Image (cartoon, helix red, strand yellow):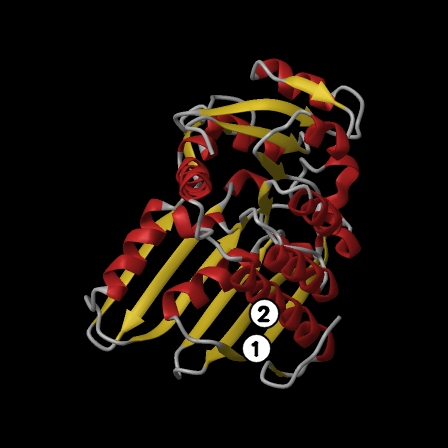
């Protein structure tokens, strides 16, 4: 691959816009084309980044781009990823890897057979606080890790096209859209397979199972508590809290709003200033493009993202049944 990496962006929603903004901070990366089925969306995003709007994935591939960045709803991840890998392109696919385990297995098989790299957008691994904490754990700074707590709470997201996030069949609800970050991060830091998941969930005005609390046991004996919610007041913003407890110490941090700032005017609602594009997405995308140039390995392997999906799906099943799911024997499609 030449020093320049060319990218085709599939999807033109909020996360696609964050990715496109982050490309600008990645040296030698050029966004060539954007595709989205909703009229006008690809044109708007492409126009902001000196790219061209095209009709669909086939048109993206026809431009000859090196990388396809899949930023669609998760029910569309598998087919797009498999097609792009089959066309011998590198692929970055947003989390969760797919909506179902059957689709994830299809993606894994395609990735094993393809010459290109596949990495999954588990961006929490690249948040500066999350990565530093993981590095400190690996360096033995808090002894043997015994417990991870990861909490993300917000109001119901209102940015998805036609409200697809609010449709559990498409998004999987907050457990697949939001808590999958916590499941992935805990597994990455603990470094041991999960063996049991128990989840309690409550309905709210935001929809079914929109407040959840999951407990995970790992083969090493460590445990994780993963909390997520779409049931909090909009005025509270997005709240993240994390804690790692080891036999020799404790690490904790929180991001009160996950934003650059907030304006409290004399009248009206608070105004939040979004800084997503300036934080972990730039690091995530930069690591992926570096891996493409080097020929691998992928920063977030598909097999690891599949394990995180399986944990989130097991939490959904536990919330539905009221029973603990034994991951050593549980099978789901």
* Residue 267 image offset from top left, x and y in percent: 53, 22
* Residue 284 numbered mark, or none: none
Camera-side residue of 11 and 177: 11
The residue indicated by pointer 1 is 197
Q: Is residue 139 left or right of residue 11?
A: left
* Residue 112 image offset from top left, x and y in percent: 60, 59
| Res 273 visible | no
Camera-side residue of 19 and 295: 295
The residue indicated by pointer 2 is 311
Quarter of image, res 283: top left
Is 210 placed above or below 315 here? above
Give SS at disc 2. Answer: helix
* Residue 306 image offset from top left, x and y in percent: 59, 63
What residue appears at the point 60 percent right and 40 percent down from the top-left corner? 89
Q: Can you say which quadrant of the picture contains the C terminus?
A: bottom right
Give SS at disc 1. Answer: strand
């Amino acid at each position: 691959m030449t020093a320049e990496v060319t990218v085709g962006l599939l999807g033109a929603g909020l996360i696609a816009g964050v990715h496109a903004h982050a490309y600008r901070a990645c040296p030698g990366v050029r966004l060539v084309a954007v595709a989205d089925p909703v009229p006008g969306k690809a044109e708007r995003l492409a126009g902001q980044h000196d790219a061209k709007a095209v009709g669909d994935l086939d048109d993206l591939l026809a431009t000859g781009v090196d990388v396809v960045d899949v930023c669609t709803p998760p029910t569309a991840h598998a087919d797009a990823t498999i097609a792009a890998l089959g066309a011998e392109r590198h692929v970055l696919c947003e989390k969760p890897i797919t909506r179902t385990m059957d689709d994830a297995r299809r993606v894994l098989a395609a990735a094993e057979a393809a010459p290109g790299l596949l990495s999954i957008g588990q961006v929490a691994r690249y948040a500066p606080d999350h990565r530093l904490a993981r590095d400190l754990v690996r360096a033995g700074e808090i002894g043997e890790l015994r417990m991870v707590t990861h909490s993300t709470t917000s109001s119901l997201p209102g940015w998805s096209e036609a409200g697809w996030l609010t449709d559990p069949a498409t998004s999987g609800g907050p457990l697949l859209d939001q808590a999958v970050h916590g499941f992935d991060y805990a597994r990455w830091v603990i470094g041991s397979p999960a063996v049991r998941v128990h989840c309690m969930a409550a309905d709210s005005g935001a929809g079914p199972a929109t407040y959840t609390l999951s407990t995970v046991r790992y083969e090493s004996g460590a445990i994780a508590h993963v909390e997520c919610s779409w049931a909090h007041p909009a005025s509270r913003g997005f709240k993240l809290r994390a804690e790692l407890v080891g036999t020799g110490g404790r690490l904790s941090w929180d991001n009160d709003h996950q934003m650059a700032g907030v304006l409290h005017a004399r009248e009206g609602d608070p105004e939040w200033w979004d800084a997503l594009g300036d934080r972990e997405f730039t690091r995530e995308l930069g690591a992926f493009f570096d891996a493409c140039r080097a020929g691998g390995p992928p920063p977030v392997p598909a097999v690891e993202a599949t394990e995180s999906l399986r944990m989130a799906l097991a939490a959904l099943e536990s919330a539905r049944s009221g029973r603990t799911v034994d991951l050593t024997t549980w099978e789901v499609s």
